[in-house]
Amino acid sequence: MLGACFYASAQVNRYVVFFKDKAGTPYTVDNPNEFLSGKAIQRRIKHLISATETDLPVTPSYVDDVRNAGATVLYTTRWMNGALVQCDALLLADLLALPHVESIELVAPGPRPVNGGRRGRVKSKTGQHDDEATPQLAMIGIDQMHVDGFRGENMTIAVFDGGFSGADSSTPFQHVFTDGRFNATVSHDFVYGGSDVFQHDDHGTQVWSVIAAYQDGVFTGGAYKAKFQLYVTEDVGTEYRIEEYNWLIAAERADSAGVDIINSSLGYNTFDDPSMDYQPEDMNGNTAVISRAASLAAERGIIVVTSAGNEGAKPWRIITAPADAQDAIAVGNVNFSGIKSPSSSFGPTADGRIKPDVVAPGTLVKVIKANGTVGAASGTSVAAPLVTSLLAGVWQKYPHLFNSMLIEALRISSSQGASPDNSLGFGLPGYQALSQYLNQDIEPLTIQVYPNPVINDTVTIETSNPTELAEAPYTIANSMGQTVAGGNAIFTWSNPRYRVSLSGLHSGIYFLRMAVNGRWQTFKLVKV
């Protein structure tokens, strides 16, 4: 926040201006469709989440005041209620004097960098006839997941990284574009500005390839049939706090656009400006900006998968942010023999939680490079997208799961689920183990809901085996995802029906969600 870290002389820097409130905003939580996509609203309905004031866009007049004072507004953040700006340091006193400004934080010296990104060129591939990604997929059962027909179809994955050079022009990624599964409208470069993410660096290209690339007989990504959003949040030339805010704002954008999973092969602990550095005690999930952002994304039903960090053989040794976030899946690196890489970061978090959460192949993993050829890469950066792929396929298979339920199942079903440690976490996950865990208590669905459409203000819920259910909690949400009714349905052999009154509700579409044998099922209702 405002303090001695500011430069004394006049200099254009980048800052985050935080506002005191959202008073006067034209947006309301009663109309989330004004700032959230339909898919984002459906995710909230599924997870029993209503829009809150945190989701509301920043008050436009506050942003106008900052702009009129002389600052260039780059982006705004809904979740942390602020604006990322660049301005002369001499303007800070004027900004702080604005009645709605709470505080200001320096996040990077100098103005936004000028776009000097490079683009990859494709070279022809020769002598490659075997699918080189098979071993890394097989190690966590993704090959069998594909055989079962789950390749990420209809799942939306966002990848946050430092650039995706060459990915738009190389053969292994072309199927994503030709199938219309790349969302160019929301994908964005938050470092330089603009929508061209296919430049700067190929770290993101390699990470994305582990999930998305496909070339028959050459390379298969883990969830190559998913839909994708790409975001450049990492400035590969420098390291400042602004990159955490880039990540935050990208997460908000991905949330609004209806993403299911965020893959982030990034980590932060020290910066080019030592005053911005974190200390090991800050890895508590609640201090680092990026970790708080990851938790805010998870609270909105998104699964965040992140690299654990490559600090295991360095003095820092432990995980880096956002791997410390409680609800983020931090992924460590093992070789193809299951042995932990010395570089893979250890846990625990500063508040004593097990980290990493799981491990995956991260040593000499096959990737697609910027020039379209197959290469190898090592580190937790390439382990994380394998777990992202696994979760995408399993969530496709079990779409009723809350993100928290799938995260819990991933941990418990992994190889060290009964005895986790701070080296391998809960161990190596696997498609078969995760599926068996999720299958263990699934009972045949026994619920009927009628009449539908509802014509007399009363809907009946009926079960054929009431002793299996006994008491079943339910909620009713409107089309905006807001809960409008709820309770506990009681079933007995003598009375296997439970009636719910909709008399206080207007005509329209509603969603009845009921916990059937501990698992939530959704029924769409139409009240006429």
Image (cartoon, rainbow, N blue to C red):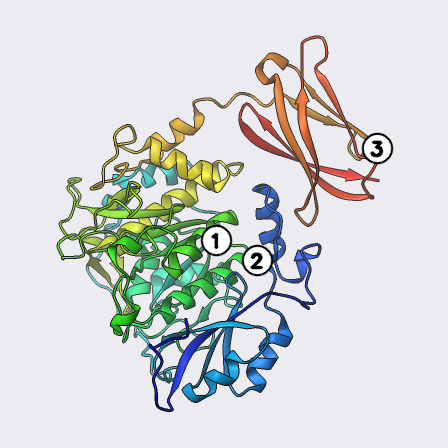
Q: Which residue is mark 2?
A: 54
Q: Which residue is mark 3?
A: 457
Q: 295 or 16, which is in the foreground?
A: 16
Quadrant including the C terminus: top right
- Between the residue at mark 2 and the residue at mark 1, the CA separation in whole angstroms equals 9 Å
Q: Nearer the viewer, mark 3 or mark 2?
A: 2
Residue at 59% x, 65% y: name it.
21
* Residue 478 percent coordinates (x, y): 71, 44
For label 3, the crowd category at 10 Å Cα-Cα, with few meaning under 14, some 14 to 19 and many 20 or more, is some
145, above or below 448, in the image: below
Badges 3 and 2: C-beta atoms under 8 Å apart? no
Foreground of the two, 28 or 41: 28
Residue type, mark 3 in image: Asp
In the rendered image, the quadrant that contains the N terminus is: bottom left
Q: Label 1, on which residue?
A: 296
Q: Is residue 456 above or below residue 203?
A: above
Q: Is residue 170 visible?
A: yes
- Element at label 1: helix
Residue 428, relative to residue 242: is it above or below?
above
Q: Nearer the viewer, residue 201 or 60?
A: 60
Q: Secondary structure at mark 3?
A: loop
Q: CA distance from mark 3 to mark 1?
A: 37 Å
Q: Quadrant of residue 375?
A: bottom left
Q: Residue drawn at (25%, 73%), measured in percent from left and top? A: 272
- Amino acid of disc 1: Leu
How many numbered marks have been drawn onto this rendered protein structure?
3
- Residue ranking furthest to the right: 456
Estimate the x, y position of residue 421 in percent, counting from the top left.
Answer: 23, 37
Q: Are marks 2 and 1 in contact (CB under 8 Å)?
A: yes
